[in-house]
Image (cartoon, rainbow, N blue to C red):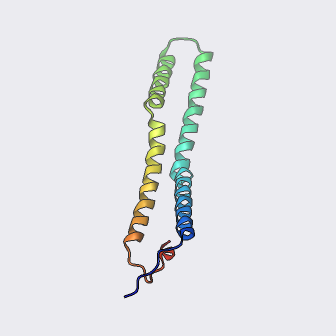
Amino acid sequence: MTSTPPPPESELSEEFRKLGENIKQAAHAAWHSDESQKFKQELRSGLHALEAGLKDVTADLTTGETGQRLRAEVQDFSAKVRSGEVESRVRTDLLAALRSVNATLHKSAQAKPTDDKPGDML
């Protein structure tokens, strides 16, 4: 029975570097995913609609139905911003991506390698 020597420190350092790079790429992919881009576009559209509505109210300084409706929409939007809904959605997407990466890495770690080279797992 022969025991395999521990891998050199440089191999461990390299694997940790690769892990960091993979995590960085996963976070980048989550931020730039189609769903994230769609969300950002929806947010831009909402802000443009808000701007257009504010211009309408400024032009029409009445307290009529349009002004009341716009005020309600602005209050609703402000509440969503204050509640952290935007930040929460980005965090949720990033958390999902990190969990997926961690699950994949965990699964890889549990698999029996075909040979005893630790560097071949990734």
Along the line of sight, which residue is nearer the eye, 61 or 40? 40
Q: Which residue is pictured at 52% across the width and 67% down the height?
A: 12
In the image, residue 65 above or below residue 51: above
Along the line of sight, which residue is nearer the eye, 114 or 7? 7
In the image, residue 64 above or below residue 5: above
Q: Which residue is pictured at 45% across the width and 22% down the height?
A: 72
Along the line of sight, which residue is nearer the eye, 76 or 62? 76
Coordinates of residue 16 in the picture (x, y in percent): 52, 62
Rendered image quadrant of residue 33: bottom right
Left or right: residue 104 versus residue 25 is left
Q: Which residue is pictured at 45% across the width and 83% down the height?
A: 115
Coordinates of residue 25 in the picture (x, y in percent): 56, 58
Coordinates of residue 114 in the picture (x, y in percent): 43, 83
Residue lying at the far top of the rendered structure: 62
Along the line of sight, which residue is nearer the eye, 74 or 25? 25
Coordinates of residue 78 in the picture (x, y in percent): 48, 26
How many marks can you see? 0
In the image, residue 8 above or below residue 76: below
Q: Which residue is pictured at 46% across the width and 23% down the height?
A: 75
Q: Please identify the quadrant where the N terminus is shown.
A: bottom left
